[in-house]
Image (cartoon, rainbow, N blue to C red):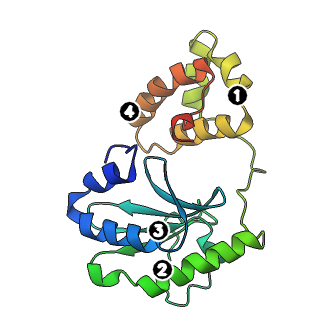
Amino acid sequence: MKRARTVDEYIRGAPAWRPELEHLRDILLSTGLTEEVKWGGPCYTHKGKNVVGIGAFNSYFGLWFHQGALLADDAGVLINAQEGKTRALRQWRMTTPKDIEAAVIKRYVKQSIANLEDGREIKADRSKPLAVPDELKDALRRTRGATAAFRGLRPGLQREYAEYVASAKQDDTKARRIEKVLPMIRSGVGLNDRYR
């Protein structure tokens, strides 16, 4: 699915799940959250802080609670979709309209807002040393001005680029990603700046 600029555009881009996404949207809007688009998808915030997002894929649709690891999850519906990578984010996958439990969703949103108001949050672990893949190091060295530009980026942006390249499983995918990011690095922009 291409990155949407509006929630309506996102929902139109997922015709298989359109009624379900509209229902989720109505439930979330009824909680008083602010609707935004972040990372190309619907995101619902409270006082500028991410609470929950909506997503649609081929075989399921669902919710992403940004601090879901702090939720009691008494309904037993939340999973960590990227075990070992994500600490706070929890996903609720749904495959039928019957999976949409408005009362549970509202309860989880209320709990998420209370956690935010109390200052409870799981922060990203930034203490890990930066591990730049050899392929990216070589490409930076071969490209005029790229090494200096990479070093000039904030550590978080350097990490985004390094992890983006390192997460590719095949060599040709790594090569394509490096080709894509080199001009961005030289321009001094972050990998995800256009979505922030």
Report how far apart the C-alphas of labels 1 and 4 lie in the structure.
26 Å
**Is the Cβ of the residue at disc 2 closer than 8 Å to that at disc 3?**
no
Q: CA distance from mark 2 to mark 3?
A: 11 Å
Foreground tag (3 vs 1) = 3
Q: Residue 41's spot in the image, x, y percent?
A: 43, 52
- Look at label 4 and name its amino acid: Asp
Q: Nearer the viewer, residue 42 or 160?
A: 42
Label 3 or label 1, whichever comes before in sequence order: 3
Does 143 sit above or below residue 172? above
Distance between mark 4 and mark 3 Cα atoms: 43 Å
Q: Amino acid at mark 1?
A: Leu
Q: Provide residue 48's location: percent of width, then percent of height.
A: 65, 55
Q: Residue at x 45, y 32 (%)?
A: 177
| Quarter in which the C terminus is drawn | top right
Q: Which residue is mark 4?
A: 172
Q: How many numbered circles does the render carry? A: 4
Which of these two is toward me, 21 or 143?
A: 21
Q: Secondary structure at mark 1?
A: loop
Q: Quadrant of residue 19?
A: bottom left
The residue pinned by badge 3 equals 29
Q: Residue at x 70, y 28 (%)?
A: 153
Mark 1: give few (<14), some (14-19) or many (20+) Cα within 10 Å: some
Give the labeled residue for mark 2.
Answer: 105
Q: Amino acid at mark 2?
A: Ile
Q: Which mark is residue 153?
A: 1
Q: Of the residues under marks 2 and 3, which one precedes in the sequence?
A: 3
The alpha-carbon separation of the residues under discs 3 and 1 comes to: 37 Å
**Which residue is located at x 38 percent, y 53 percent?**
7
